Amino acid sequence: MVEAVWSTANGDVLSVTDVHGEQISRLGSHLDPLLECIGNLTQTIRAYDKQIDALCKHYPAAEVLQSISGVGPITSLGYILTLEFPERFEDSRKVAAFAGLT
């Protein structure tokens, strides 16, 4: 038995044990493209995360909203960018109606 190890584009390691040499070759031919795809997607997601974080810095309310448990950057930005000018609403009930929550 042999241990096979693959490394993804972002440095994560995938280890497979209890396989024979020829199985490693066949397994690798199937896993390598998938691992490359996962690595590319991971890099893309990280780039989007950076853009979202940078956008949050333009909206001080985003940090306040993120202090609520379960509210992250995407939710806070979605709320802020959907409402645009919250002062146009008389009260929170109007905001809920606008958002389709009532």
Image (spheres, grey):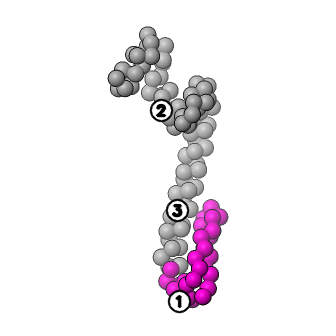
**Residue 9, located in which quarter of the rendered image?**
bottom right
Q: Give the residue at mark 3.
A: 38
Point 36% across, 20% down: residue: 97
Look at the image and give the residue range highlighted in magenta.
Answer: 1-27
Q: Give the residue at mark 2.
A: 78
The reply to whether callout 1 and callout 2 are in contact (CB within 8 Å) is: no
Magenta span contains residue 45: no
Q: Give the residue at mark 1.
A: 22
Magenta span contains residue 4: yes
The reply to whether callout 2 and callout 3 are in contact (CB within 8 Å) is: no
- The secondary structure type at the circle numbered 3 is helix
Rendered location of residue 45, percent (x, y): 54, 51
Marked residue nearer the N-terminal end (1 or 2): 1
At label 3, counting other C-alpha atoms closer than 10 Å, the crowd grade (few under 14, some 14-19, many 20 or more) is some
Point 57% across, 89% down: residue: 21
- The secondary structure type at the circle numbered 2 is helix
Whether residue 88 is visible = no
| Quadrant of image for the N terminus | bottom right
At label 2, counting other C-alpha atoms closer than 10 Å, the crowd grade (few under 14, some 14-19, many 20 or more) is few
